Structure formats: C-alpha cells, structure tokens
Amino acid sequence: MRILIAPSGFKESLSAGMVAEAIARGVRRVLPLARTETLPLVDGGEGSAAALAEALGGRLVPYRTSGPLGAPVDSHLALLPGGSAVVEMAATAGLRLVPRELRDPGLTTTYGVGELIAAALGHGVRRVLVGCGDSGTSDGGAGALTALGARLLDADGRELPAGGAALTGLDRIDVAGLDPRLAGVELLVACNPCNVLCGPRGVARVFGPQKGATPERVEELSAAMERWAAVLERDLGAAGLRTAPGSGASGGLGAGLAAVGGRLLPRFEVLLDHVDLDAKIAAADLVITAEGAIDAQTPSGKIPAEVARRAKRYGKPVLALAGTIGAGAGQVHEAGIDAYESIVPGPMPMAEAIDGGEEFLVAAAERALRMIMVGARLQRAGGSPEILGTPRPGIAGNGQAPPPPVGRPAVPPTVGEASRGIARIPVMPPLGELIRGRVA
C-alpha cells in the first residue's frame, strides 16, 4: 500500500514537517511495510519561508523587526534563486508572537511586515512574495504601509497610532514618502481568495474572535476596515478592495499591499505546485492530511480541503486528522474528505493538548489505520481481492487507473467592480518557474 501524508502544521504547536513525521510513525505501527511518503505543506503561514527556501535552493536571512505589539522580535526572510524573496508575515506579525493575555487585534500591527519587505528590497531582488497566514493582526496592512513610508493622518493632520482600531479616525493617506524601490519590483501576495476585507464575511467578523477580539471590538474593527477601504480607493485609486478575493488575507494585509501595486494570488496555486502534489496523490492508494482544527472554515481554502479536492480528481480516499473538531465539521465531506478524527483522546486543557500533540498524532494515526484495516478485511471477506479499491459511487476514478489531470482549479469569481486588476485573482504558474523569471 502506498500512503501519501500531506498535512498542514498545527498552529502554535507543531510544524508541518513534525506533523507529517508523527503520522508516518503511527502508520508504520500498523503497516510497517507500507510505502509512506511525507509531504509537509504550507499555505503562506508559519514555516513557509523556510519550506520554500529548502525546496527551491534558497536561504533564510535573519532580521530583527518590530513584532505585532511593537516590541522587537527575531524574524527572517528567504532569498531564492532568480532574484526573488519570500516574506512570511507570520514570522513578524503572527498570532504566536502575541501572548494570550495580550491578544487584541485592534492594537496589533503589521509594521514588521513592511520592515521585512524593505529589507528584501535592500537585497536588490526583482520579486517579493508575501505569504499570508497565521496572523495576529487586523490593521488592513496599515502598519506595513507605514513602515514603507506612507503616512496615515487624522483630520488634524496627526499620524495615527498603530493598530486596526485607530483606522476609524483615518482622514487621508500621504504616500509621497513611499519607498520608491517598490515601483521596480513585482510584489506578489499569496493569500486565501475566500478572505475578504469587508461585509458580513469580512475579516474582522470571521477571524477577529480567534485573535482575541470581543464582540464590541469586532464591530469596531469592521467599521475600521470599511473606512480603510474607502480611503484607499479615494486616495490611492484602489477600487474594488472591499470584497476583492484575498483582500482580507492576514487581517486585511492583502488589501493594503494591493493598494500599492501588489498582486493578490491564490496561495495554493503559488505555493503547492512546486512539490508536484497532484502527481504524488495520483500515485497513492490513501492520502492522509491534517490540520489544527477541522470545522466549518476548513472547506474555505484550508490545506486539508485543498488536498482532498485534488485527491477527488483521482478518486483517492482521504483521511484527515485534527487537533480539534469544531462546529460544521461535517461540511468537509462535500470537500472530498472521506473521514476525519480528532487526535485528542479526551477532554483536557488546551496547554496539555498542545504539549502532547506529537504523541497524540502518532496514536491517532495508528487508531485510524487500524479502523481502515478492519474495513479492508471485511471487504476481502466479501469476496473482493482489492484493498481500498472498490469504486465508490459519485467519485470518478476510484478503483480504476487515475484519469489524467483536468487542469488547475477554477478561480473564485470576481466580486464587485475592480480596477488595476486587484479584484480578480489570476491563475498562476508554478512557483519554481515564477521565481526564476521564466514567466511573466
């Protein structure tokens, strides 16, 4: 049996590589002779810069930047072959950098992201890829623009303090001092196209509570994002940002960078193709993926759903392991995940679950594989010679030779009017080609 293990990392706990290795250990307890392949996946969040540097022959460069609360933090960027740099926003403004007792997305800032972009420009790169994910901010990218030379002013001409809540008092944006080097590079933003800046599904409402926002703060931040979008459109000509796909990425960082010329790109098209994910799925008999939480948000651009969607092209069964199972988790079946299981063996404090995450993963993978083998034995007892090979209704290709790839997934439709190409996210070529300048 060939098993592909393609997980995401568990936020604030385990990297994608650690998750993959733990699952592989559990699998080998049941099937020691199985051919397992580990394929840690990144989505632009924690670990993305390091993963891309390793995969594409680049290197990490350490930097000291402003953290999400303003205090200095140790961060980094990746320099890749072909004159490209990767800025991982989570490395300088991630949620893990905000102590739990201090979490308030109305006060945190993306200033360090702008510092890393400026540092990348200092290396003379031609292309800067900003990975969005795992943010602890909701300032619309205002901090990043400030670090790059923009001035955010109130009605009295005073500069606004850091944080998304302050944007309710924004009167105008002065970009006269914006770093001129930005005009000479391609600024690419790898983001989740399901995340938008404003509206009922705006970033403050969907993700604000996860970052520590109270209901009152959520409403304040929602109003702040509306004001931010209006001023960006008026002063920078950035129309269509309120509901542009990806504009809400990393607390609205996508919108801020798009307003100064950044191109919002679907993150999986940029970040996953270099690992040849489809070919590895096609060669597997079973695909195992994982994420910190399986819930109603999983189908909206999370790694397990993306893995499952691609696996469905080839009729491959998909098992997902998760730290927690949340409300609406059953929706993942429609996304192509055949079964899911929590790794936590019983009720326990969050800190205990995080501390024991690696061993819990090993044990959960073992339990899941034993259940699968029970099903395989029942199948054999019923006269079928195949293991996991019986075609399942509604999933083309299962139990048959894999069909040829059907092309890249469709891009979510444009929402609203757009200008300067920021409201529609184009399908992108593989990152390996993109960074080496082989394509536009």
Image: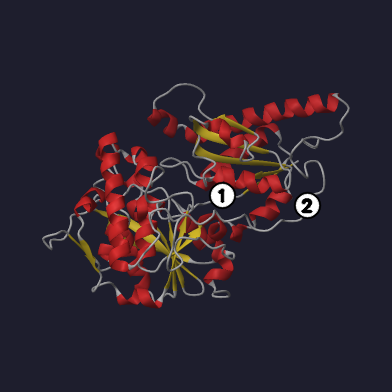
User: Which residue type carries mark 1?
Assistant: Pro
Q: Residue at x 18, y 54 (%)?
A: 161
Give the alpha-carbon distance from disc 2 to disc 1, as whole Å.
25 Å
Q: For mark 1, give the secondary structure.
A: loop
Task: Depth check: give the residue in front, 62 or 423.
Answer: 423
At label 2, counting other C-alpha atoms closer than 10 Å, the crowd grade (few under 14, some 14-19, many 20 or more) is few
Which quarter shows the C terminus? bottom right
Residue 6 position in % (x across, y down)? 60, 46
Using the rendered view, name the quadrant where residue 236 is placed: bottom left
- Is residue 67 visible from the viewing direction of this image? no
What label does residue 40 carry, if any? Answer: 1
Task: Depth check: give the residue in front, 76 or 301.
Answer: 301
217 relative to 28 in the view: left or right: left
Using the rendered view, name the quadrant where residue 392 is placed: top right
The residue carrying mark 2 is 403
Q: Nearer the viewer, mark 2 or mark 1?
A: 2
Rendered view: 265 above or below 373: below
Task: Depth check: give the residue in front, 353 or 379.
Answer: 379
Q: Residue at x 43, y 40 (%)?
A: 13
User: Which residue type carries mark 2?
Assistant: Pro
